[in-house]
Amino acid sequence: MLTSPKPLKDVFFCPEESNFYSYCLQSLVLNNCLSSETIIEFGSGDGSPVINSLSKLKFDGVVHGFEINKLSCELANERIKVYGLSDKYIVHNRSLFDTTKPQGDYLISNPPYLPAIDNKIYQPFLHGGTDGITVTKQLLSLDYKNVLAMIASYSNPVGAIDYALTKGYHIANFIISPLNFGYYSSELKVKNRIEELKQEQKAFYSKNMYLLAGVLFTKQSDRQANLSTELVQLMTCL
């Protein structure tokens, strides 16, 4: 398992969440990829999820990651070199939104989804807007054919799914895992906002646990399954 030597305030560090993102990437994307496909990643963090996935599977394409946090980008590229993946994983220190849209077969992301009134929280890079899905909606607006996004049950999951449907996506597949509230989501400012969203029926969780889903949205006509109703039911069951 990759570990982070950086303080939690400097570089996102949550092994449970990163490992689940890696598993979703392997199961929903890489296992279905052709060898020459290009993957675009928003928010690479320290690179561990993609590095873990590429280390386990044969993939002859390229993943281009975009990470705005300079320390995270440096750490990711250090690890990429150590694992000998420099020809398969390239992390750029800039925002995907500030770049001419790069071409790719998939867009993947564990996007910032902490809900808070503003980004003055312990890890500002994790701020996902007032309901946690602002960045997710921006990613879905980029119009990639396939999008793998992580969606939290306490961050307006129904709103995220409904927005994807309005953009012409359907849900090809998904994986759900229960996670405990961690260091970042337990910050008082974030927890208070999550409680407000629960009162508005936009957040779903139990005392110590929420659900995280890796969701593969697609516009491909050969993938006709639309699992949106099933996903909504599961994400709102807590």
Image: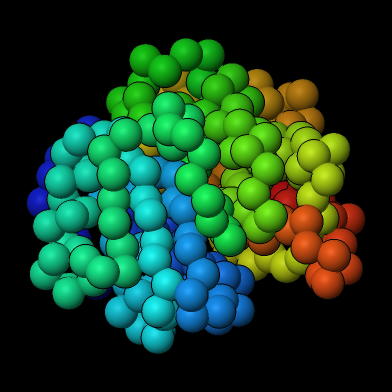
User: Is residue 110 visible to us here?
Assistant: no
Horizontal relation, residue 77 to residue 142: left or right:
left
User: Is residue 17 visible to us here?
Assistant: yes
Residue 8 x/y as whole percent:
22, 40
Residue 23 x/y as whole percent:
48, 72
Residue at figure coordinates x 29%, y 51% from the top left: 91
Residue 2 x/y as whole percent:
21, 66
Between 97 and 115, the one nearer to me in the picture:
97
Residue at figure coordinates x 73%, y 52% from the top left: 235
Residue at figure coordinates x 37%, y 15% from the top left: 120
Residue 175 x/y as whole percent:
64, 67
Residue at figure coordinates x 56%, y 76% from the top left: 33
Horizontal relation, residue 106 to residue 184: left or right:
right
Q: Relative to 104, does residue 11 appear above or below in the rendering?
A: above
Q: How is the image coloured?
A: rainbow
Q: Quadrant of the N terminus?
A: bottom left
Please give the count of numbered marks on the rendered protein: 0
Between 49 and 59, the one nearer to me in the picture:
59
